[in-house]
Image (cartoon, rainbow, N blue to C red):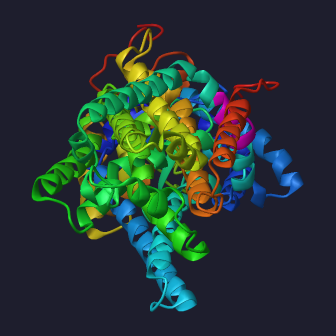
Amino acid sequence: MTLTLKSATFRAQREADWLALEKLVQRARLGGIRKLSAEELQRLPLLYRATLSSLSVARAIALDRYLLLYLEDLALRAYLVVYGPQRSWFATCRHFLSRGFPAGARAAWPHILISFLCIVAGTVTGYALTDRDEAWFSTFIPAAMAGGRGPGSTRTDLLGQEIFAPWSGVAESFGLAASFLFQHNTIVGILSFGLGIFAGLPTIGLLLYQGLVFGSFLCLHAHRGLLIDCIGWVSIHGVTEFGAIILSGAGGLFIAEKLVFPGRLTRSDSLALHGETASRLAVGAMLLFMLAAILEGGFRQLVANTPLRLLIGFSVGACWITYLAWPRKGAGA
Amino acid sequence: MSSVQDRTAAFLGGSVRRRHSITTPEGVQLTVELADATERAAAFLIDLILIVLANIALIVLVVVAFGLHHQARLVIALTLFAGFLVRHLYFVRFELAWQGVTPGKRVFGLRVIDRSGGPLLPGAIVTRNLTREVECFLPLLALFAAGGGAVENVFLALWLLGLAFIPLFNKNRRRVGDMLAGTLVMVVQKRVLLPDLAEESSEFSFTDRQLREYGAFELQVLEEILRRPKTAETEKLLTDICGRVSKRIDWPDPIPQSQEGAFLSQFYAAQRAHLEREQLFGRVREEKREKQIGVAGE
C-alpha cells in the first residue's frame, strides 16, 4: 500500500519557494532590504505573499507539526523584513524637520497655547509677589541657580557682571551654557514631557514654576531700572528656550489629554495613536534647547546692545513661529 | 498557532511564552512570542554596558584632545553633551538601521515590532527611546550625581523601581515607552525546515477503523517523540507508546523490539494521511476523546 499525503505533496510543490525566501530573509536580517540586489528585491514580496498563502493552506490541510511551526516562523520573519523600517537615519531627520515637527506642533496647538498661558500666569504671579517683597526671589530660585543674584544685588552688579559682562571667550562661555543646559533646562523639558503620563498635573506645575522664576527674575531687575535691558539680555536665547519649554510642556499635556480622555479608543490604543505627535513635540523641543544653548553661549555677551538683542531674540522667535505654522503641501504626513 | 500545537508543547513540557496576535496588511494572522521581562532587562544591561564603554572612550578622547589642566569646564560640558548624544543616538540608530534590534537585543533574539502589525515607523522608535530618558537615565544620573538629599534619593529610587516593574503588570510586558509608541518586544525564533517524517513505503497497513482512534493532538505528540534523538530514554518511551497504541487499535500480532520504530513511524504516516483527508472534508478531530461527528455511513 502506498500513501499519498496531501501535506507531503503540498510541501514538495512549494518547498523551493520557502527556502528561497528563508535565504533572502537571512541576508536582510540586519541592515534591512538595502542588503538585497534589485532582482532579489523584486522577488521578496512575491515569495513573501506565496509563503503567507502557503501558511494559510497549511493551517487548513496539514497536520505536520514541524511544517506548521516552520511556516509560522518564516512568515513572521519575512513580514518583519518586508514591513521593517525602511528609512535611513538621514532621511528620518530630514522628514522630521520638513514635515514631522511642524505637523506635531500644528496638531497640538491648543496644548501649546495652554502651556504658554501657564508660563505667562507663572510669570505674572512671580512678578507680582516679588514686587511686594524681594525675599520671594530667594524662595523661588535656590542659591545654586541664582548665581549670586538676589535682593542684595545692586544695579551696578547686575549691569557689570551679568547684562553687559565682558565676553569670556568661546571655550568658557560655550562650556558654561552647555553644562547649564544639560544640568537643568533639558531635564525640565524632558520631565514636563514625561510626567504628562500623570494626567499632566506635574507638567502644569513645572510650567508654572518656570514662569515664577522668570517673573521674579524680571521684577528684581525692574526694581533697579533694568527691565528693558534684562528682557533684551534674556530674549536673545530665552525666546528659543521658552519655546522649547512650552513645546515639551505641550507634549506632556497632549499625552495627558489622550490618556484621560481617550474617547472611543481604549487608553492604550489612544496613547499609541497619539504618542508620535507627542514625541515630535519633545524631540523638536530638544532641538530648540540646543539652539538656545548655542545662542546663549555664543551671541548673548557678544552683542552688547539692548535694542539689537531684542531684535535678534524676537526675530528668531518669529522664525520659529513661521517655520512651525507655515502651511505645507501634504501636511501631517 | 493553533490550540493543538500549544497543547502539544505544554504536554511535552516546553515552556509556553506569552503570545500576541498581529494581522499583517495581507490579512493573515501571525502569532508573535513576547519577550520575558528578564530577557529584556538583560538586553538593556548589555546595551547599557556598551553605552558606558562608549562614554568612557569619549571622555578619554576629550581629555587627550584638550588636556585636563585648563578649561575643565569645557571638558565637563563636552562629555556631558557627548554622553547625552551617545545614549540617544545608540538606541535610535540601531533600532532604525537594524530593524528594531540593538546589540543587546540581538544577543537574546529580541526585536521591537508594531503592536498592531503595521510597519515600525521611525516616529515610534524615537518615542520609545525618548521615554527611556524619563524612565531610566535621568533618575539614574540624578541618583549618582553628588549633592542629592536623602529624601530625593529615596524618591528617585522608588521612581526607578516603580517604572522598572511596570512591564510585569501588563499583559504584553510593555514598558511606558512601548505604550507611548504602540510597540511590543518579541522573540524571534529561527526554526529550520526538517524532513517530513511520513514515509511512502509501508509494511504495516492500517484499517480506517484503527486510524479512527486518535486525533491531531496525539499525532503531534507522536511526531515530537519520533523526532527526538535516539537515546535509551527515547527507546524506552517508544516501546511504551508502541504497546499502548497496538492495544488501543487492537493490533493482532505482537511487535518485535526491532520493528517498533518502523511500526510507529508508519502508523504516524497513515494516521496523518487519514486525519488530513478527514479534515479536508471538514471533519476535524482534535484529540482522541472527541467523538467523531458526522462520519458518513454511521
Q: Main secondary structure of the magenta part?
A: helix
- Residue A110: x and y in percent read 52, 18
Q: Above or below — where is B297 with respect to A178?
A: above
The residue under the point 36% across, 29% down is: A122
The residue under the point 64% across, 57% down is: B97
- Residue A152: x and y in percent read 27, 54
Q: Above or below — where is B293 with respect to A218?
A: above
Based on the picture, tell me whether residue B35 belongs to the magenta stretch: no
- Residue A60: x and y in percent read 56, 26
Write down the quadrant of residue A117 in the picture: top left
The residue under the point 88% across, 53% down is: A38
Q: Where's the C terminus of chain A, which quadrant?
A: top right
- Residue A255: x and y in percent read 43, 27
What residue range appears in magenta? A96-103
Residue furthest to the right in view is A39
Q: Above or below — where is A270 with respect to A122?
A: above
Q: Where's the N terminus of chain A, which quadrant?
A: top right
In the picture, measured across the screen, residue B136 lies left or right of residue B184, that is: left
The answer to whether one can see residue B103 in this image is: no
The answer to whether one can see residue B142 in this image is: yes
Residue furthest to the left in view is B150
In the picture, measured across the screen, residue A8 lies left or right of residue B22, that is: right
Q: Above or below — where is A229 with respect to B288?
A: below
